[in-house]
Amino acid sequence: MTTKPAAAAARATVYGYPRQGQHRELKKAIEGYWSGRVTADALHTTAAELRRTHWRQLAGAGIDEVPTGDFSYYDHVLDTTVMVGAIPARHRDAVAADALDGYFAMARGTRDVAPLEMTKWFDTNYHYLVPELGPDTVFTADSGKQIAEFEETLALGLTGRPVLVGPVTYLLLAKPAPGVPADFDPLTLLDRLLPVYAEVLADLRAAGAAWVQLDEPALVQDRTPAELGAAARAYRDLGALTDRPKLLVASYFDRLGDALPVLAKAPVDGLALDFTGRAAANLDALAAVGGLPGRRLVAGVVDGRNIWVNDLSASLTTLGTLLGLAGRVDVAASCSLLHVPLDSAAERDIDPQILRWLAFARQKTAEIVTLAKGLARGTGAITAELAANRADLASRANSPITHDPAVRARTGTVTGAHARRAQPYAERATAQRAHLGLPLLPTTTIGSFPQTAELRTARADLRAGRIGTAGYEERVRAEIREVLAFQEKVGLDVLVHGEAERNDMVQYFAEQLTGCLATQHGWVQSYGTRYVRPPILAGDISRSEPMTVRWTAYAQSLTSRPVKGMLTGPVTMLAWSFVRDDQPLGDTARQVALALRDEVDDLEAAGTSVIQVDEPALRETLPLRAADHAAYLAWATEAFRLTTSGVRPDTQIHTHMCYAEFGDIVRAIDDLDADVISLEAARSHMQVARELAAHGYPREAGPGVYDIHSPRVPSAEEAAELLRTGLRAIPAERLWVNPDCGLKTRGWPETRAALENLVAAARTVRGELTGS
């Protein structure tokens, strides 16, 4: 294909960039500040250096307009809460006393004050802090952060574009504050919020900003006529302002649907749209509304959420079509590059042939620049780049890694019968209670225990060759002995081995499955200072040998109480990895499920009576449009059942989910057919228990009573009161007692205290129920 030059030179831009730095400098500085080892001034200096480094990287690569304001110490939605002055009442004194410490108090809580609720950012694995609003909320503008970071780009001689969470999305993401009726709609505060945005926009214009980007990803979800009307009103009013920069309204992650004509008609200066994956439908929809004549279109044609090289020719075809639909077309990634690692060139352990298939943030930036050059000057200007890209795509398509005949033959034999337990739940429950002999309100944890500095050092020493495998494994066995001894002493009923041998709940398995790749430096932010290295599911998946059996069996040999086998489920393996995009997700999930099914069967054969298959990502991977839900949930729940359905009736299957809106998928949770489910519930005050009850969920459940994402240690009475709340929705014979999530990120002192209180709470409430 030959593309003629665009009438106006296309610009290259991005919506956001990874925050952490090449060596996670931001994480280390923030955690150093929390521990008292780093001063506030030193933290601010590190952050400023990182911002300058990132902007210079972008500009040096050829990005014409760099984003500002997307950098955050914890979360960009929390930054928006600060920008609009919506500080919860319980945090106002802390913020007034010290803005930075108050900011972190909202994110993490303190000994005495709970943090904001945290949940997933749309269908990604990034977590945001949920705004708390009510009818008495008073918004006040604080544009200091946005102005300061924009002015930093000016000092570097760069063109910056401030990026803000849009007012409609901000309100749609919010929840009623504690004490506010649950039916309060934060969107009713729109007219109160818009003047604050107007003030921020005026401040940015005064600072010299030519354009400001307002992100409205909530509009790619199904929205009511009232919500669409609110969006129309918001951008009518903001567009009508005279003292403002040019406005670029951005959406991403899916197609806009009915919201596209609303935004296309709004008096704003440009739209930034996603044209990848499901959002490719935006192209025809934009044509249907007559395009954006005389206005700017920023075309997200490079996938900002996955790590595969872009098909440059296909993207140029899309861009060529878009040229006729807008006054000017610029090139971008589909969303912020926050969701991918920084630089694939840092990976030294990946086969160079495979490395050609990968594009992290810096490589995606180069792709965007190449596409902008091709759009502006014609394909003749990027002949070499197109040839290299075609070779990379062919290398991947023809690789034996991506096509394993044995794996494909096995998946081809799967039928619906393979994905169903042989006995109904009622029969299984009777067999499991007789076999396990657990008390009323049984206590357990979710799986992981604190990963101590000694463990991390031992793992690093093993990688560096400073210790041998035997020495490392003895360190792991010692940790398992300590974890088991503590659990028995504190009085937990179903124990875990603590996962001392695991670096990450997904990476650990991916490193042992064929068709998967692990990175050394592919860090991606999950929340706050929590960074993960998502594996890469590059080809067909299978298991060559048991992955967890010997460690679980060793733990079971140390105690007479049941020890749970711990696995990560197939949907979460996909969701928390960079998954191949050359076949349907359901096909990949089925391959992973069959590999895990082998592990489940081996655990049972080794004497494990309780097996937990975690699926925290089931909700976050739910498509953003309701029309796509049924197809996704069909293969997702089938994959879980395929993993777990081969066991005896007296083997108890658990699953776990956390930090998501569970009410949207209660029917699917039921369809998993797990015997026990544990869920996050502490920050949301047992909301999930009420949702399960409303659905008539018939099996056992453990809504969490200890929020492990905060350093707060809940008192025994606080945990007991949450249990009593849970009992109002779930019968005692089906209620478990557990934390919200794994304890890997917590320290031992708080873990000991919190679990002691958790067990004490269970005993107290158990006594209230039995009169003993």
Image: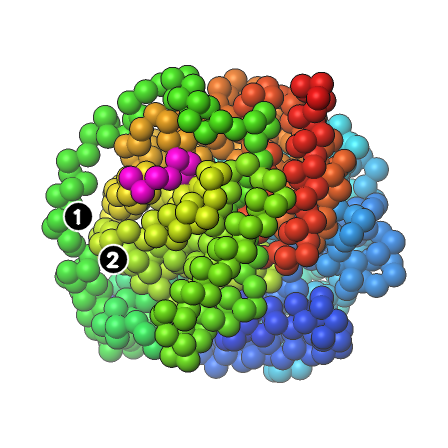
On the question of residue 37 being in view, the answer is yes
Tell me the quarter of the picture where residue 329 sits.
bottom left
Crowding at label 1, few (<14), some or many (≥20) Cα neighbours within 10 Å? some
Q: Label 2, on which residue?
A: 515
The three-letter code of the residue at mark 2 reads Gly
* 40 left or right of 728 in image: right
Crowding at label 2, few (<14), some or many (≥20) Cα neighbours within 10 Å? many
Q: Which residues are magenta?
A: 605-613
Q: Nearer the viewer, residue 477 or 636?
A: 477
Q: Label 1, on which residue?
A: 407
Q: Nearer the viewer, residue 190 or 277?
A: 277
Q: Nearer the viewer, residue 539 or 736?
A: 736
Q: Earlier in the sequence, mark 1 or mark 2?
A: 1
Residue contact between numbered discs 1 and 2, judged by CB atoms under 8 Å: yes
In which quadrant of the rendered image does the C terminus lie?
top right
Residue 290 pos. (x, y %): 43, 45
Tell me the quarter of the picture where residue 281 sits.
top left
* 556 left or right of 415 in image: right
Residue 616 pos. (x, y %): 48, 43
